[in-house]
């Protein structure tokens, strides 16, 4: 008798957490729709009622929840409300996409190894906020975007994918942010695809991609001056 090969009964169930425009959410929606990511986005949560990303989700027929942080007395009760919604929806992977609340260990431990974030800089350089302006002010010639597992230290988890973009003379924070965002829309779906396919192995800080096609660096990782 041979061992049965475990197969997934159903596509991976993803939730996306947003606070704003949701262009990364849109990229994930589009790449799920065209079959690149073998998964389903089953829930979008926003901590702001006016986040445009909510409209994007509704247009795609994805259930949405607005969970405002303001009525809660503390971070723990806000996060518990989100955890309850995510568990009720049987979410297996949580993607932060412009979600502008720092998460505490309560939330991060609940979804350890199942929580991704995208950051608009080449980590470990420029963690935190205002990173495009900080990269320009530092005189960096390149910046980029990073998709990483979320750990308890902010913007410091194991890196899954990065893209490099040049910083051009005359760039300001909005022009650099726009150039980086175009690459975010490529590498976030790539990272989620690899996760959904079970192809990521984490050893300490290093993430290895196993099996299947290798990643073409020309296609994903280096942006020409656009
Ligand atoms: C992106 O630049 C992302 O890297 C950062 O917040 C921004 C969100 O943009 N965390 P959008 O809402 O996905 O358009």
Image: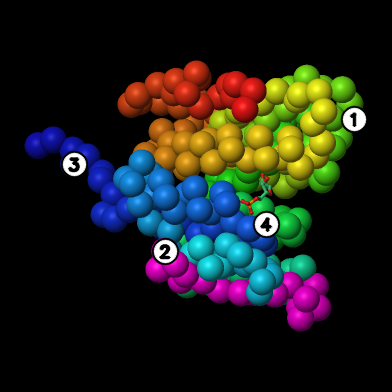
Labelled disc at residue 60 = 2
- What residue appears at the point 74 percent right and 59 percent down from the top-left corner? 101
Seen from this angle, which residue lies furthest bottom?
Answer: 71
At horizontal 33% and vertical 46% (from top left) the residue drawn is 34
- Asked if the residue at tag 3 contacts the one at tag 2, i.e. Cβ–Cβ closer than 8 Å, the answer is no
Magenta-drawn segment: 58-74
Q: Residues within 10 Å of mark 4 (few under 14, many from 20)?
A: many
- In 3D space, how far apart are the residues under numbered discs 2 and 1 (Cα atoms)? 39 Å
Q: Earlier in the sequence, mark 2 or mark 1?
A: 2
Q: Which residue is mark 4?
A: 99
Q: Is residue 55 magenta?
A: no
Mark 2 CB in 8 Å range of ligand 1?
A: no
Element class at badge 4: loop
How busy is the neighbourhood of tag 2: few (under 14 within 10 Å), some, or many (20 plus)? some
Mark 1 vs mark 3: which is more N-terminal?
Answer: 3
> Which numbered disc, 1 or 3, marks the residue closer to the eye?
1
**Disc 1 to disc 3, C-alpha distance:** 57 Å
Q: Position of residue 98 (x, y in %)?
A: 66, 53
- Say the numbered circle drawn on residue 137: 1
Q: Nearer the viewer, residue 66 or 168?
A: 168
Which element carries disc 3, helix, strand or loop? loop
Look at 32% across and 45% down and name the residue there.
35
Pointer 3 residue: 4
User: Who's the residue at 25% across and 45% down the image?
Assistant: 7
Q: Name the colouring of the figure.
A: rainbow
| First in residue order: circle 3 vs circle 4 | 3
Percent x, y for residue 150? 64, 45
Looking at the rendered structure, the secondary structure element under dot 2 is loop
Q: Residue furthest right?
A: 137
Asked if the residue at tag 1 contacts the one at tag 2, i.e. Cβ–Cβ closer than 8 Å, the answer is no
Q: Earlier in the sequence, mark 1 or mark 4?
A: 4
């Amino acid at each position: 008798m041979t061992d049965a090969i475990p197969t997934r009964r159903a596509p991976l169930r993803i939730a996306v957490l947003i606070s704003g425009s949701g262009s990364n959410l849109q990229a994930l929606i589009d790449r799920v729709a065209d079959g690149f990511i073998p998964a389903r986005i089953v829930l979008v949560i926003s901590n702001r009622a006016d986040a445009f990303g909510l409209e994007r989700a509704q247009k795609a027929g994805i259930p949405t929840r607005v969970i405002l942080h303001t009525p809660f007395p503390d971070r723990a009760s806000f996060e518990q409300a989100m955890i309850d919604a995510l568990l009720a929806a049987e979410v297996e992977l949580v993607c932060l996409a412009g979600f502008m609340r720092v998460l505490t260990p309560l939330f991060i431990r609940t979804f350890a190894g199942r929580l991704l974030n995208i950051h608009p800089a080449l980590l470990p350089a420029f963690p935190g906020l205002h990173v495009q302006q900080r990269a320009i002010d530092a005189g960096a010639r390149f910046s980029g975007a990073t998709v990483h597992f979320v750990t308890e230290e902010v913007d410091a988890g194991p890196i899954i994918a990065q893209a490099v973009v040049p910083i051009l003379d005359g760039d300001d924070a909005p022009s650099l942010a726009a150039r980086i965002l175009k690459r975010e829309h490529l590498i976030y779906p790539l990272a989620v695809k690899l996760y959904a396919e079970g192809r990521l192995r984490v050893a300490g800080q290093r993430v290895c991609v196993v099996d299947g096609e290798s990643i073409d660096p020309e296609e994903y990782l280096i942006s020409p001056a656009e």
